[in-house]
Image (tube, grey):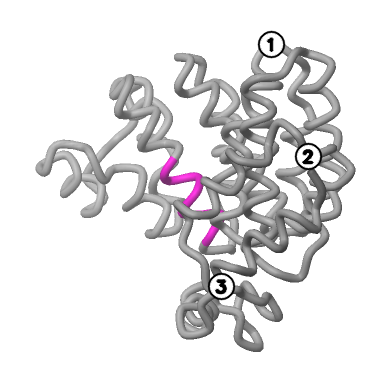
Amino acid sequence: MSAAEIRAALAELADAERAAGMAGYFQARPGGYGEGDRFLGIAVPPQRAVARRYAATTPLDDVGELLGSPWHEERLTALFVLVRRFERGDDDERARIVELYLACRDRVDNWDLVDASAPYLLGPWLLDRDDSVLDELAGSGSVWDRRIAVMATFAGVRAGRPEATLRLADRLLTDPADLVQKAVGWMLREVGNRDLARAEEFLAPRYARMPRTMLRYAIERFPAERRRDYLAGRVRPRT
């Protein structure tokens, strides 16, 4: 199978009216975070179905070609293919997939593309490896690189190893980008869902410096009274 066949399958699903709505939702307007992106107007489940149909038989070079597409759904479907291949691949194929992902990450350029890929490709690959690439990405001027770094740490959180999440959260504590603030807050919330004491140990000495968006995401699942304490500035770090 080829990139052209996947494109043809997606073209059959295109919906111009839906595409217009998606362009607004993903801020493809001038000055928006998705400025210049183009949409076919395809919901996520059909894209996943296309990915399942073609994943095993599409060469990685063709997947890379799709990642270079100007169409959002072609890029997202390519990422679904990579995730599916990664989940079923041996270490050699996984290494090739991660290499391709990092080489093409400039095309992973909206929050849904990041969130559909980084926690399921880069994160699992780095769990038992040197994860310094996350620090490199966290130091990037690209909001998408920084979100990739944060979202990749979800794999560690799910494995009960949130150290990378906490390290990057500390580094990105005052990041100016809303989409990074939300990602950091989300990952801290996931830490708290599994280990509330550890989340509070991180938050108590730092929350006053956090953007409000990040804090609200981080404490979203806390008991109501505890949320009020954080929002009112009443929480003090343990001495």
Judged left or right of residue 134, residue 236 is left
Q: Which residue is mark 2?
A: 58
Residue in the foreground of this view, choosing between 97 and 170: 97
Q: Quadrant of the C terminus?
A: top left
The residue tagged 3 is 14
Q: Residues within 10 Å of mark 3 (few under 14, many from 20)?
A: some
Disc nearest the viewer among 1 and 2: 2
Q: Are marks 1 and 2 in contact (CB under 8 Å)?
A: no
For residue 19, which numbered disc appears in the image? none
Along the polypeptide, which appears first: circle 1 or circle 2? 2
Residue 183 colored magenta?
A: yes
Q: Which residue is mark 1?
A: 128
As for residue 138 lying within the magenta part, the answer is: no
Q: Secondary structure at mark 3?
A: loop
The boundaries of the magenta stretch are: 179-186
At 83% from the left and 49% from the top, the residue drawn is 104
Vertical relation: 13 (above or below) 181? below
| Residue with the most extreme bottom position | 30
* Residue 120 quadrant: top right
The image shows a total of numbered marks equal to 3
Q: Quadrant of residue 202?
A: top left
Identify the image quadrant of residue 144: bottom right
The quarter in which the N terminus is drawn is top right
Q: Position of residue 46 (x, y in %)?
A: 49, 54
Horizontal placement of 100 versus 126: left or right?
right
Q: Where is residue 196 shown, x and y percent of the image?
A: 29, 24
Residue type pointed to by label 2: Thr
